[in-house]
Structure formats: C-alpha cells, structure tokens
Image (cartoon, rainbow, N blue to C red):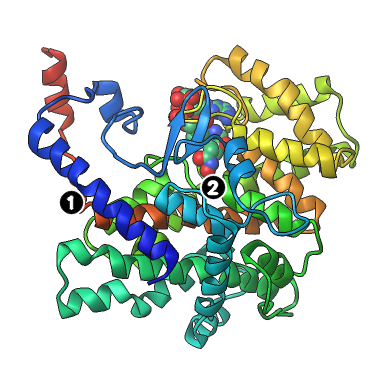
C-alpha cells in the first residue's frame, strides 16, 4: 500500500463514526429550509450536500481542506526552482487533509508516471472523431471510453462489501489523475498543432509534463501547476462536482461520473465561460482594430452585450459575493509575468468597468469577476490561443476535486441521491394561491 493510500485508510477509519453518529443520533435535526424561489431557482444555497474536501464562503472564497489559496500554495512542496507547488501534493491534501512531505509528494509523482499510459483504443477513438469536434467532447469521450478499465466496476461484479468500495474507486481516481493531463495534451497537439504529438517526459512532474507535452516552454509549467490547483475544487454544489457526485451515487464508477462532470463543465454558464471571455475580448479587439479601448469605449461594448440579452462572461457567481480569490491569484501571476500584455489590459479594463455596470443594471447578485475572467489571458500569452481548448484545462483541474470527492463518497457510503419533486400546482397550494 502506498503512503497516500495508507494515510487515507487511517483517515477514513477515523471519519466514519462521525458520519454514522450524525445520521443515527442527530438525523432529524434541521440544517436548512427550502423556499419556493429555491425550488424553482436551481436550489441556490439549499444546504443538502456534504463534503470535507473544500468549503466555499461567499465572502472569503474557497478553502481547500480548511486552507485558503495563499496558505495552500505556501505549504505544499514545490519542485526545485519553481514558484508553484506540485499538483501531486495538492491531490494528497485534497484526499487526506494533510500537507504531504516532499518525500510523500515525490512518491506520488513516481506513481502517476507508472499509471499514465493511455490505452491505444482511447487514442484510436479520439482520432476517429471529426477534427472539428469540440475538444470537451473529445475529452469527455476519451474518459468514458476508458470505462472498461474501471477497477470499481470489476470489483463490483465480483462482489465487494460497501466498506471496501472506496479502494477500487481510489484506484480508478489515481489512474484518471495520471492520464487526464496526457489525454488533454494529446487532444491539443492532435487538433491544433497539426497532429504533432509529444510523448510524455520520463522524469517530469504532472505540471512539468503537461507543459512539455503541450510543447510550451517555461514558465508555462508553473502556470499550469497553479491553474490545476486553483480549478480543483469549489465545494460540491457547482454543476460539475455535483454531476460527478450524482452519477457516482448510483454506484456508477469514476469513469462514468467524471465524464458526466465534464459534460456539465462544458456549459457556457460554467467552465465554458473561460472560452467565452476570450471570444468576447477577441470580438472587441476586432472592432477596435487591435487597439485597447478606453474605459468609456469598453463600457459601451459591455452595455451592447447586456442590451442584446447576453451575459458578460467571467463575471458573477452563484455563491461568491466578492472578487474570486482564484481570479486574484491568476491576476498576481499576470502582473508578475505579463504586465504589458494587451489582452491583460483588456481584462483589467473589464475589471474596472463591469462591476459598476452590472450594479447599475441591477440583476446580477455578484458583479465581481470569477475565475474564468482571468485564466484565458495567461494561456493566450504563452501561445495557447485556441480558446475552445480552455475548458479542457479546467476539466483536468476540476477532475482533482471531483475524483477526490468520489473516493470519499464511497468511503462514507453516501447513498443514491434522490431529491423530491413537486408540481407547480403543489407549489401554488403551498403558497396559498387560491385561483
Ligand atoms: N452578466 C449579465 N447578467 C448576469 C451576469 C453577468 N455576468 N451574472 C448574472 N447575471 C444575471 C443573470 O443572468 C440573472 O438574470 P435573469 O434574472 O434575467 O435570469 C440575474 O443576473 C441573477 O443572476 P444571479 O442570481 O446573480 O446569478 P446565478 O446564480 O443565476 O448565475 C452565473 C451565476 C455564474 C451563471 C452568472 O453570474 C453568469 O451567467 N455569469 C456569466 C457566465 C460565467 O462567468 N460563468 C462562470 C461562473 C464561474 C464558474 O462556474 N466557472 O466554471
């Protein structure tokens, strides 16, 4: 058993009695109520999911296992000479709640190298798809087609006790973590770089190898360490994490669940917003002949979009009520590494004008930028300008959290998810509407 699995087994044993006690002794205690607006309005703020992997405070932002983004970045081990931590160490943190030592992190780096070979039939299926297929479709398909590899499925078919189910789920998660960056980079090189595939590097860590396989020079490796960590988890209620949890609650395996999570991420109100931000900026750039607009000119573009009934991508959030700290962390990266980049100037101009406009319009509950407003500019700067690929990057990052949650879902025996529906007439009845 690896150090990580051993540590996780101990954590699971220690945690289980807490969940059992809460259900058995306190199961009837209320932890929230549901209003009609919430039932119709996408269950905003309904307290009905449990996860210990991250928590999203509306005013503070995300904490991974209780730690803010700066605390997490500070405490995780980093490769020599690099500014951002090993992604592998972050996986250890998400799974166990402990910061790994350098040795534990390197053990994981080595383990992923052993697990990362992508079966040839997965490559064949991706290659058989029309080249103009959206890369998220390719990515989700590649994950789904690998489902025959599932150790969870094999163990279930043989017969496995509920207490043991987390172990094959862990194996599936580990194999997916190892392979997702490799698949993503393969899609990129196949689709956008004239099919010039770069094989994995024998010695590099996950972030380093991803940059290598993408064919992008330093410090893109560090950017991607930061990127994958920032996008990893945002508690359980966001559409991708929730989809993964829901699908796995049927005892579907990690391949089905993660592939479905990617499908949810592919919507423009969720992960596709990072592509939409760059598309929106490019549209403005075309109209401006490449010039950076003044703030007044930018205001007009923003109002034009709103007046045509569209949202401003990269702004607003279902939970957050302040500027997303994931936005700020990427902004810090841009200030340091690409301060004079014209697209960064666009992003800054949007930061200056959009919140006031959204407040004036009076609809969005949160006028501030979210993670997606800033992530594309970094990619563009390092030459990854095919912005329909950006959501795949988000998908690799989000997989870290989704899969860590699935392991714990099985460890704690979370049941089939099955909320109750009402009819509109029933709601009218609840509301006391007579006619
Ligand atoms: N531009 C224009 N209008 C916006 C807006 C924006 N950026 N954000 C919210 N609104 C509007 C909503 O469309 C809604 O309008 P209607 O009443 O006409 O339906 C109203 O304000 C109230 O919405 P809300 O309660 O503030 O926000 P929601 O919880 O419904 O939605 C969204 C949250 C993130 C989907 C929303 O803010 C949005 O569409 N933003 C733009 C797309 C985006 O950036 N998505 C990425 C979010 C981060 C993420 O999950 N990344 O994966």
Judging by the rendered image, the residue that carries numbered circle 2 is 271
Vertical position of residue 351 compared to residue 185: above or below:
above
Asked whether disc 2 touches disc 1, contact meaning CB atoms under 8 Å apart, the reply is no
Q: Which residue is mark 1?
A: 415
Q: Quadrant of the C terminus?
A: top left
Write the residue at 56% across / 61% down.
105
Can you give x and y, in whole percent of width and height, for residue 227 in the image? 64, 50
Asked if 356 appears above or below 193 in the picture, the reply is above
- Percent from the top left, x then y, of residue 431? 16, 15
Helix, strand or loop under label 2: loop
Q: Nearer the viewer, residue 72 or 10?
A: 10
Q: Quadrant of residue 209?
A: bottom right
Q: Find numbered disc 1 in the image and state the secondary structure of the residue it sits on.
A: loop
Quarter-wise, where is residue 217 in the image?
A: bottom right
Q: CA distance from mark 2 to mark 1?
A: 27 Å
| Label ID, residue 355 | none
Q: Is residue 397 visible?
A: no
Answer with left or right where residue 156 lies relative to residue 52: left
Name the spot of residue 190 as percent of width and height, x first. 67, 76
Q: Nearer the viewer, mark 2 or mark 1?
A: 1
Residue 170 in view of the camera: yes
* Quadrant for the N terminus in the image: bottom left
Residue at image coords 20%, 54%: 413
Whether residue 208 is situated above or below residue 311 in the rendered picture: below
Q: Is residue 5 left or right of residue 357?
A: left
């Amino acid at each position: 058993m690896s150090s990580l699995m051993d540590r996780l087994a101990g954590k699971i044993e220690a945690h289980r009695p807490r969940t059992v006690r809460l259900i058995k002794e306190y199961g009837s205690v209320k932890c929230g109520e549901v209003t009609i607006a919430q039932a119709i309005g996408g269950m905003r703020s309904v307290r009905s999911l449990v996860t210990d992997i991250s928590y999203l405070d509306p005013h503070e932002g995300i904490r991974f296992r209780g730690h803010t983004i700066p605390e997490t970045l500070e405490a995780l081990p980093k490769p020599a000479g690099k500014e951002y931590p090993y992604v592998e160490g972050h996986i250890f943190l998400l799974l166990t709640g402990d910061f790994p030592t350098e040795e534990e992190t390197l053990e994981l780096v080595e383990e992923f190298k052993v697990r990362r070979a992508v079966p040839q039939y997965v490559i064949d299926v991706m290659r058989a798809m029309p080249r103009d297929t959206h890369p998220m479709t390719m990515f989700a398909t590649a994950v789904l087609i690998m489902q025959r590899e599932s150790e969870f499925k094999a163990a279930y078919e043989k017969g496995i006790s509920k207490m043991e189910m987390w172990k094959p789920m862990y194996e599936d998660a580990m194999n997916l973590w190892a392979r997702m960056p490799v698949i993503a980079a393969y899609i990129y090189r196949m689709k956008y770089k004239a099919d010039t595939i770069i094989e994995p590097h024998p010695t590099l860590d996950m972030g380093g190898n991803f940059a290598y396989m993408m064919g992008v020079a330093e410090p893109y490796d560090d950017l991607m360490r930061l990127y994958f960590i920032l996008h990893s988890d945002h508690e359980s209620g966001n559409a991708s994490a929730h989809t993964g949890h829901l699908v796995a609650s049927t005892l579907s395996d990690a391949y089905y669940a993660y592939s479905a999570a990617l499908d949810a991420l592919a919507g423009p109100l969720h992960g596709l917003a990072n592509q939409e931000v760059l598309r929106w900026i490019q549209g403005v750039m075309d109209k401006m002949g490449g010039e950076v607009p003044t703030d007044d000119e930018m205001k007009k573009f923003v109002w034009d979009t709103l007046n045509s009934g569209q949202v401003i991508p990269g702004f607003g959030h279902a939970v957050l009520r302040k500027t997303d700290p994931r936005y700020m962390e990427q902004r810090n990266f841009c200030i340091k590494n690409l301060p004079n980049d014209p697209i960064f100037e666009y992003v800054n101009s949007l930061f200056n004008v959009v919140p006031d406009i959204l407040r004036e319009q009076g609809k969005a509950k949160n006028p501030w930028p979210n993670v997606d407003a800033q992530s594309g500019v970094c990619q563009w700067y390092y030459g990854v300008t095919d912005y329909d690929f950006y959501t795949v990057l988000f998908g690799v990052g989000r997989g870290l959290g989704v899969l860590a949650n699935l392991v714990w879902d099985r460890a704690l025996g979370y049941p089939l998810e099955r909320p109750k529906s009402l009819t509109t007439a029933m709601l009218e009845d609840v509301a006391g509407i007579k006619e």
